[in-house]
Amino acid sequence: MPILKRLLLRLVTTFVTLFGVAVIVFVVIRVVPGNPIAMMLPPGAGEDDILRLKALYGLDKSIPEQFLIWLGGVLQGDFGTSITTRQPVLELVLSRLPATLELSVMALIIAVVAGGILALTGTRLRGGRVEAGIDVANGMALSVPDFLWGLVLILLFGVLWPVFQISGRVSPNIDLPFSTRFYLFESVLRLRFDIWADLVSHMFMPALALAIPLAAIIAQLLKQSLKETMHLDYVTLARTKGYGENHVIIREALPNAILPTLTLVGVQFTFLIGGTVIIERLFSYEGLGNMAINAVINRDLPLIQGIVILFALIFTMVNLLVDLTYAALNPRLRRG
Amino acid sequence: MADARTFVSRRAGLRLWLSGGWLVLLTLAAVLAPFVSPQDPLAQDLFAARLPPFWQAGAEAGFPLGSDSLGRDVLSRIIYGARVALIVAVIAGTLTCLIGATLGLVAGYFGGWPDLVISRLVDIWMAFPPVLFAILLIAVLGTGLSSIIIAIVVIDWTRFARVVRAEAMRQAAMDYVASAQVAGRSRAGTMLREILPNVLPTILVLLTLEMGIAVIVEAILSFVNLSISTDQPTWGGMIAEGRLSIYQAWWVLVFPLVALFLTVLSFSQLGEGLKDRFDPVLR
């Protein structure tokens, strides 16, 4: 029973949060100076044209009225029409979402693998120069945000030693015979490893830039909990049974030490997704973030609204999933 | 073990000196910009375009770190850019700290409905992608120094509110708070005289870290050309220009990037150093 109550409470707060986001975005962007209608009209358009167009986009009504109309549409899956491209917002946003999801997940995988290896190495060789070295590298990686790592990577592997692509998602001369926009995923399924390699060489630099700070956080926290677990009695027992140090760390200590890291990874993953906005811009990667910045520059209100809501939806869903996983994995919480 | 610990503490001291040193140097350069920069940062000279830095062939005296595609001196632009970066760091950092810490203190100490409202707001804020939120706010507020500062405060107050709230709650549960109340101190008095001094070290660490974050946010905004007016040099603006001519003139990107990197690193190392100093467990 308590777990059901927790779940319900959690769902309610999620909805409150999403509603709050919707209200704030709606109010904020309606204060935008600079009339988006004026930019759409040809020179010489009359007063009637302006009014007609305003009515078409619903901009002639009061802000609460506009909000209710918009909310009603959203609940039916209608996010309005983009002012710059005149296409449905939902369609535009969904066409870019796969690119951003693939980038985020690739960054997450890099971060987990790199952070995990660093934590295990640091625990195995604890108290020595190697661990001190890992701590220094972690400190550096944590101090500098993804935007700066992106620029450093562009210089190192895009210019100085150009082994990776630093612009775009895929080479323009490649024909994509795909039916979805999850290019990376689909290229594996269709066994088109030539396209897969091209996609990865474009994606690796932005993904690594996003992954570096998260990898450092994972390495730091996991190493700390591993070292704490290593002092527990059952680990000592395993050692006296004659198991080797590697077995003790990986098979005995790791399963118990991983839970706090898992929770943190979930929260940090939302920060990583937020980071894609500027990283996509930096690497001219055609995802949601890049589209969002263009929408802000073009004052495309319906599109901005749609993108922010989608980001908020992803963030809250990730947090919800993390909470549920945590509750499911933690026996103390399961019993309530 | 003892050996590793002295190694760590010596390194921590060095870290504080180096980061403090860089920030002092940068502040001096920014304050004395008109006297120390070799050129007018805005002066264009197409005959002196894309000059390389001093150690390379073709460099010219007066352009020690080279010039950009319009012939503007890179070093002078970095020095003037430091003014913007530091002003934003200090003002936005302090305002964010004041607002966020106050809300966190109230939520953590008073609990009840103030806590409920503030915590819900924090939740909503956490669901926004911060960079997108900042860009959106600048689009609404218009570009300019005060807009950037407002945007940073609006986005980042939650950083202080969350941590200070948790810390204030922890302190409020301690015996000394109860005894202060027994001794007849008012609720507000207890908050300011008893809780605040104990939370202050945490706030100072956060403030230092926030200054580094403010520098980055300003750089990101000027990178997407939404910072202050385009004719004033900013590090982010220089980086954006350098990104375009990266194969022709790498120095236009590299030097402002180094300045930004060192500054952000220094603020954060300073914060970490303060944390070690204040935290008796770590010390």
Image: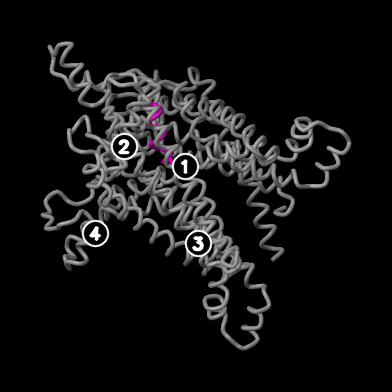
Q: Magenta region's main secondary structure?
A: helix
**Whole-number angstrom distance, CA of label 1 to CA of label 2:** 16 Å
Q: Position of residue A24 (x, y in %)?
A: 42, 32
Callout 3: residue from which chain? A
Label for residue A184? Answer: 4
The residue lying toward the viewer, choosing from A180 and A273, is A180
Secondary structure state at the residue bearing disc 3: helix
**Whole-number angstrom distance, CA of label 3 to CA of label 1:** 25 Å
**Whole-number angstrom distance, CA of label 3 to CA of label 4:** 26 Å
Q: Amino acid at mark 1?
A: Val
Badge 2 is on which residue? Answer: A72
Question: Is A6 placed above or below A42 here?
Answer: below
Mark closer to the observer (3, 1) = 1
Callout 1: residue from which chain? A
Report which quarter residue A74 is drawn in. Answer: top left
Badge 3 is on which residue? Answer: A262
Asked whether, in this view, residue A245 is left or right of residue B73, the answer is right
In the rendered structure, does residue B138 fall within the stretch colored magenta?
A: yes
